[in-house]
Image: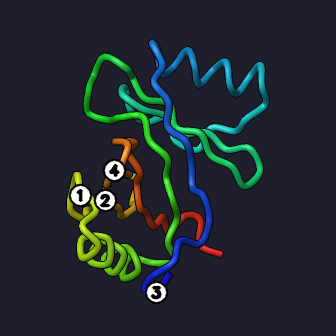
Amino acid sequence: MSGPKFTRMGHVAVNVKDVHASLKFYKEVLGLSVAWDKSEDWGFLRLGDDDLALLQQDVGKHHPHVGMRLANRAEVSAMYEHLKSKGVKMLTEPMAHRDESFSFYFSDPDGNVIEAMYDPRYES
């Protein structure tokens, strides 16, 4: 593949009925650490280098997806242009988020949602 490259899988985002109850379960029962719990509609957990996002299923702001990491904001923008030039269905433009990440969403040929993202909290 020519152009920008993903550095690694970032996270999987799944729907849950109650974000805070699920955060508690994953922390207290399964041993994941909470990385973000400042929202009523989503939470973020970590296990080693792996991340899990929990999305409030009835809110509709977020959709289940797979997050793929890029090295920096410029790479996110470059990936956006690269995928767009290949005719990939773009769901959003690159944007900054409240947790300081920078990303955009697109879909694969089957309609699965993928987030191309940079998160400065996880710089290597």
Choose mark 2 or mark 3, whichever is in front: 3
Residue marked by disc 2: 104
Q: Quadrant of the C terminus?
A: bottom right
Q: Residue at x 44, y 41 (%)?
A: 65
Q: Which mark is residue 90?
A: 1
Residue 39 sits in which quadrant?
top left
Marks 4 and 3 sit apart, C-alpha to C-alpha, by 19 Å
Residue 43 vs 96, above or below: the answer is above
Q: Residue at x 32, y 54 (%)?
A: 105
Q: Earlier in the sequence, mark 4 or mark 3?
A: 3
Q: Earlier in the sequence, mark 2 or mark 3?
A: 3
Residue marked by disc 4: 107
User: Residue 29 at what x, y percent from top left?
Assistant: 77, 19
Q: Are marks 4 and 3 in contact (CB under 8 Å)?
A: no
Residue 94 vs 110, above or below: the answer is below
Marks 2 and 1 sit apart, C-alpha to C-alpha, by 8 Å
Type of amino acid under label 1? Met
Residue at disc 4, secondary structure: strand
Marks 2 and 4 sit apart, C-alpha to C-alpha, by 10 Å
Q: Are marks 2 and 1 in contact (CB under 8 Å)?
A: yes
Residue at disc 1, secondary structure: strand
Q: Residue 84 or 51: which is nearer the viewer?
A: 84
